[in-house]
Amino acid sequence: MKAVKGRIVKSLPSQAFVPTCDNSGAKILKIISVKGHKTVRGRMPAAGVGDMVMASVKKGKLEMRKTVVPAIIVRQKKEYRRPDGMRISFEDNAAVVLKDEKGNPKGTIFKGAIAKEVAERWPAVAKVARIIV
């Protein structure tokens, strides 16, 4: 996992519901925690594009429901700034469910675009992605 370039706004706090954009069987995830996140006392941990989160499956296939899975945030509505000055915002928030903590995705097809920051940081996710913005 590489460090992410640019100033990405952390717009998805823990306890947020995020839809998935893959065919893993999960439909809606609830963010429980953000991996590698450090804050001041009392502040809610939050995630942005490219962050790995631990999430609970709220809607989806019966065998997936009520399980805790690792996921990566691939899109966010809140705009963020890239190092070249360009500002990026997506139509919706979306996450991808992972098989393991190493970054291998569980699904084989991703619906919609995926941020360039995610593709740089997680090469296994970039292999499956069709559109990288």
Image: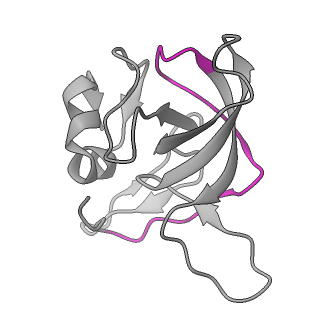
Left or right of 131 in this view: 32? right
Check the picture and name the quadrant holding the C terminus. top left
Main SS, magenta residues: loop
Look at the image and give the residue range highlighted in magenta: 6-26
Residue 93: % across, % down: 59, 38
**Residue 11 in view (yes/no):** no
Compared with residue 47, is residue 133 higher up or lower down, i.e. above or below? above
From the viewer's side, name the closer residue of 84 and 26.
26
Q: Residue at x 56, y 34 (%)?
A: 91
Q: Residue at x 49, y 17 (%)?
A: 24
Q: Residue at x 43, y 18 (%)?
A: 111
Left or right of 44 in this view: 78? left
Left or right of 108 in this view: 94? right
**Residue 52 in view (yes/no):** yes
**Residue 110 occupies which quadrant of the picture?**
top left
Q: Work out which residue is located at the far bottom of the displayed protein and give it.
A: 40
Compared with residue 21, is residue 10 higher up or lower down, i.e. above or below? below
**Residue 3 occupies which quadrant of the picture?**
bottom left
Q: Residue at x 28, y 26 (%)?
A: 129
Q: Is residue 17 magenta?
A: yes
Q: How many marks?
A: 0
Q: Is residue 103 magenta?
A: no
Residue 77: % across, % down: 59, 45
Check the picture and name the quadrant holding the N terminus. bottom left
Residue 11: % across, % down: 63, 59
From the viewer's side, name the closer residue of 66 and 84.
66
